[in-house]
Image (tube, rainbow, N blue to C red):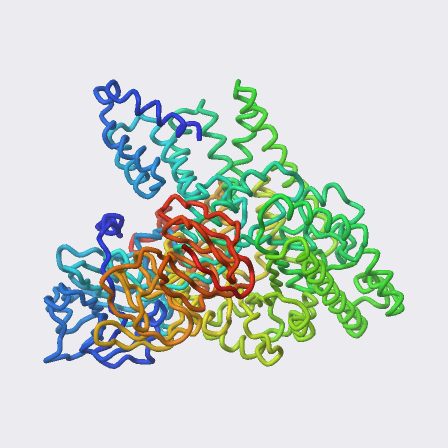
Amino acid sequence: MMRNLILISLLASMPCVAVNPGFAVIGADTSSAWTTVLNSVGFQPAPLASAGVVVVKQGAACDPNCPTAAAVSNGLVLILEGSSATSAAFGFTPSGRTAPIRREVDERALSLLMIWQLAPATVPIFNVPSGTTVFSADYWSGAPLLVGKKMGSGAILWVATAPGPQTYDRYPYLFQAMSDLGVPFPFQARKLSAFLDYSYRANVDLDYFAAKWRASGLRAIHLSAWYFWDSTANDAWLQALIAACHRHGVLVYMWLELPHVSQGFWNANPQWREKNALLQDAQVYWRLLMNLQNPDCVNAIVAGLNSLLSRANWDGVNLAELYFESLEGTTDLAEFTPLNDNIRSGFQAQGGFDPADLFNAASSRYFAHDPNDLQTFLNYRASVVYQMQTDWIGRISALHATYPALDIVLTTVDDLYDPTARNLLGVDSARLLPLLNQYNFTFTIEDPAELWSLGPQRYPALAALYAPLTNQQNSLAVDINVVARPGITYPTLQQTGLELWQLMRLAGSAFHGVMFYSESSVFRQDFSLLGAASAQVTSYAPAATGMQVTAPNGVGVNWPGPAQVDGQLWPVKDGTYVWLPPGAHTIAPASADPAWLLLDLNADLVSAQVTNSGISFAYSSTSGAIAILNRQPNQVLVDGAAIAAQAVSNGAGGWALALPRGAHSVAVQ
Amino acid sequence: MRRLALVPLLLLAAPVFAQQDPAYGILTQAYAALDAGNYDAAISYFLQALPIDRDREDIREDLGYTYIKDGQDQAAMGPFQQVMDMAPANYQAALQYAFLAYEQQDNSDIAQARNIFLLVSQQTADPVSQATAETAFENVDGTLAANIAYYQLAVLLDPMDYTDHQLLADYAEQRSELTLAAQEFKIALDTGFASLYLDYARVLGKLGDVADQIQALESVVNSADPYTAEQARQQLAAMGQLPASGQ
């Protein structure tokens, strides 16, 4: 079992070459499986003659256009599926034996259970040519399933079968294998946000992580605030994290989980603890809930919030899951809230009875006897949640007077696709969405657990439910929980590899913003491809000397050399990607880079140009923005006025410059 | 990062070490990679250095700390576990291992962390390590005891709440109250979740009840939950109860 795998790390050091984004499939692409797979990291359909990636399906005849070894050596990426004349020509031949495949195991994730749907599938065992790397194999028989080889400036990948019925349920790490063979991905975006739990990263190299996050497509991290609430003991770490993130172009948001405040706040204030339906102090999962209907408790939380904001250079606040989390509703009374004194007296005045009676089996109002009284309380509870969310958005918005760049996010679980959330948690999105016209914030819809097994297509369906309820489409975002899911999902319980790429891609096409939980739960082997998967390109065509690309939100295009964009020398690029503003653009080679480069911009790029003395660009951002320049600027003009902000070296050849929130034009020299 | 702080001293003493240390060359590359923040390369070099001198605790510790800097906490447990096996009195490594184990959120790891904190608090002569271990043990044990009490009351008030029975079983296993854990997992089996048989089997195994452990695993080896079935199959194969082909 997997004894003969070659160390993949040896391949990782191979030099990268620019990739042609076009792909073609030889043979019937049943259910567009390969198209879906290749689209997930940005490859675009193209005629066979101009394709940089070619798939030869099982049994497909391709004479006289069969890809040759010479074509591969010259840069073609060839994917061979099972048995075909082309597979045989490259040395993949059936052994005559078969194996029932139930579980695939990949060298980069040996302990990860990867189960094939409809398993066991009986698959021929192939002989693989020498010099190849077996990336994945059957756990029990050792039959090779995903094999690759670097050939010149191209590569071949052989897979034992077609992609599975869902298109992502076999060979989840196909693209990691491709990357190991030195094939870069055509497009890149850096607009993702991720939750970050301090406890998982307390001892890491922060500078290294900040650079990694940005390179992997992150715009912002949302840091668990409760670890910093009770004391200043961790402030040095907090300030170091934010400084490192800003140096590398990453924003840092304060992630709140009210009614949970912190362990210390819970310990110090037993009088303000929330009560569950059993009238115990409410601890629901890891959260220690406080009574947000108690004015003294709220005042103390506001004081703590102000203290924490003043101690570090935060870019925003995320009010996450601000409701009464009880996923099992009244079937788990230990987790059903709120039954604090304020709620009980408030509801009594309105509803005419103590809601605690609903959960007292001896009471005539016991919920199991009469669901109507319970529903009356659940409606009241939903109105309390609405009021809490409105109040807290208002409180954070009021902080703009002190912190003008502070961005606001409200993360709330979906209740339109899955309406049961209203009774379970008190969420009422339809009522809340009009607040987007009153306050500037991002409404982030958390993917409910009940939908996790439904596949990536749920995101367009989810977006279609929310879009009609607001005219602030750019303020809608989705939050993907990347965690082990309940129930049976294939090929893995936690989203990884191909499934994760498809999730990111479809979520990004349906919503303006995408965030995920969490920075540490995403498997290590997945992280570096997040940016490629989240790039949205709606059309691509090869041009005489370059390419035409249309991207609705702007995109990075793999283009290692100097570039002209729309006929002008282009200054927004790093060594690997040329960064384009939204819309259709043509890229062509240039003779040399300009002296000044905008290596990275954490904001929406609107335009850019090379000037006589440097560069100028325009951007917009709901938060403060960060520009990374290749030189330390002598002068920075924002909307024509010089700013005092100093660029900070990021230690990797870049100079990070903090820029204001909003829409601005910048001139650097 | 006690070991990593030694890097500059090691480099200054290069001529002496170069003659005596067969792993010197590869370690020099490891520390240079470490210094450059190239953790993948540093880890690779440390792994290459290990078989050159298998008795070196310090290489394992430095490998462990490098994994931590790289955010690979689970991987870091391996080298620290090896140091604990090689040098049971290396309480610094034991504490590091215990903190990493506690972070894994796995019942067995948390139980192991709790036991190590207790052991170190009782055995180390170093007052700092003793205080650290004592505080950690009190925090872990106190939280587990409170959670067990909370869910014991919850299942008393609502005996049909199988989620709470499962949570109670988890906390009991983490606190090494294995009889209680087995009892509560057994009740939670009524939820019909096949994966709970794996938890139940694991606790039975810790109690030394191998026959019942095998029976619990066999009861889900053909489960409709393929993840549970596959794990049961793998565990039974490791116990010699299933052919190596898994069929």
Q: Residue at x 47, y 45 (%)?
A: A244
Is residue B78 shown above or below A444? above
x, y percent for residue A209: 43, 47
x, y percent for residue B221: 42, 58
Residue A115 shows up from this direction: no
Horizontally, is A497 left or right of B121 in the view?
Answer: left
Numbered disc total:
0
Q: Of residues A8 and A540, which is closer to you in this image?
A: A540
Horizontally, is B45 left or right of A433 in the view?
Answer: left
x, y percent for residue A383: 76, 69
Residue A98 shows up from this direction: yes
Q: Quadrant of residue A416?
A: bottom right
Q: Of residues A370 and A301, which is closer to you in this image?
A: A301
x, y percent for residue B151: 68, 49
Q: Residue at x 24, y 65 (%)?
A: A590
Horizontally, is B25 left or right of A577 in the view?
Answer: left
Q: Of residues A331 and A374, which is closer to you in this image?
A: A374
Q: Quadrant of residue A570?
A: bottom left
The image quadrant where one finds the C terminus of chain A is bottom left
Q: Of residues A365 and A457, which is closer to you in this image?
A: A457
Q: Quadrant of residue A150?
A: bottom left
Horizontally, is A111 left or right of A265 in the view?
Answer: left
